[in-house]
Image (spheres, rainbow, N blue to C red):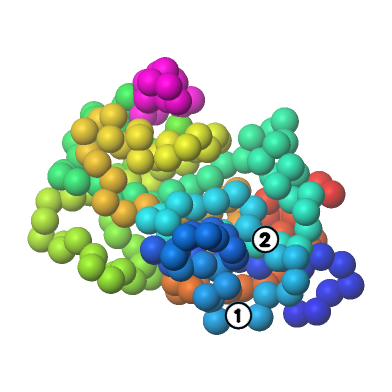
Amino acid sequence: MEQGGHRYFVLHKPFNMVSQFVSPDAVNLLGDIDFDFPPGTHAIGRLDNHSEGLLLLTTNKKMTNLLFSSPVPHKRDYLVRVRNVVQPEELEPLRQGIGLPGSGGVDYMSKPCEVKLVEKPAWLADRPNEYRDDIPHSWLLISLYEGKFHQVRKMVGAIRHPCQRLIRVAIEDLTLGDLPAGGVRELPEAEIFRLLKISP
């Protein structure tokens, strides 16, 4: 989809890939994706190596500030598999805000979030070396308006249900949909801005 200005791409970032095109380390890179990204393409925000899901890429250098430095916080939705069976009442501390370890050992109180127990979606493919379904676990859908370092993993760890799999499925109204791991979808600027609820 050629456009006169900037270009915008939604990527389903696979497991075991960093959110970068260049790294001094021997890691899987965004450039390994089978797609011809134009020069100047970069990721907006990051998903760590072991996280999966929606990653926005663009040639627009202003997008990071527009989306993540906005005075109005933007919602991000994460699908999370955690160890052992979660009882509904265990989710209440996450909804209220929970103390998390911060830099230098300083605790940080997370902001209240939305969280509910869900079933594993039919569209979500098993990843390589997936945990077996017969091992006790739960799936959660967590919606945040902040994004501290490894925050979702720290939050579920704080209620003693360590994270086993983490997939970002949406930023505001921009959704991953049924895009497979490694899949790329290009969208026009007007649609991206509308779905992300930002203005140029």
Q: Which residues are magenta?
A: 94-112
Inspect the image, locate mark 2, and give the three-letter code of the amino acid beneath it.
Answer: His
Q: x and y percent of residue 184 in the render?
A: 58, 74
- Position of residue 18 relative to residue 30, above or below, is above
Cα separation, mark 2 vs mark 1, equals: 14 Å
Quickly name the residue at label 2: 42
Q: Nearer the viewer, residue 127 or 90?
A: 127
- Position of residue 156 relative to residue 62, above or below, is above
User: Which residue is at the far top?
Assistant: 106
**Residue in view at x 25 percent, y 47 percent:** 82
Q: x and y percent of residue 70 in the render?
A: 72, 36
Say which element carries label 1. Answer: loop
Inspect the image, locate mark 1, and give the three-letter code of the amino acid beneath it.
Answer: Phe
**Residue in view at x 70 percent, y 36 percent:** 69
Quickly name the residue at label 1: 35
Residue 181 falls in image quadrant: bottom left
Say which element carries label 2. Answer: strand
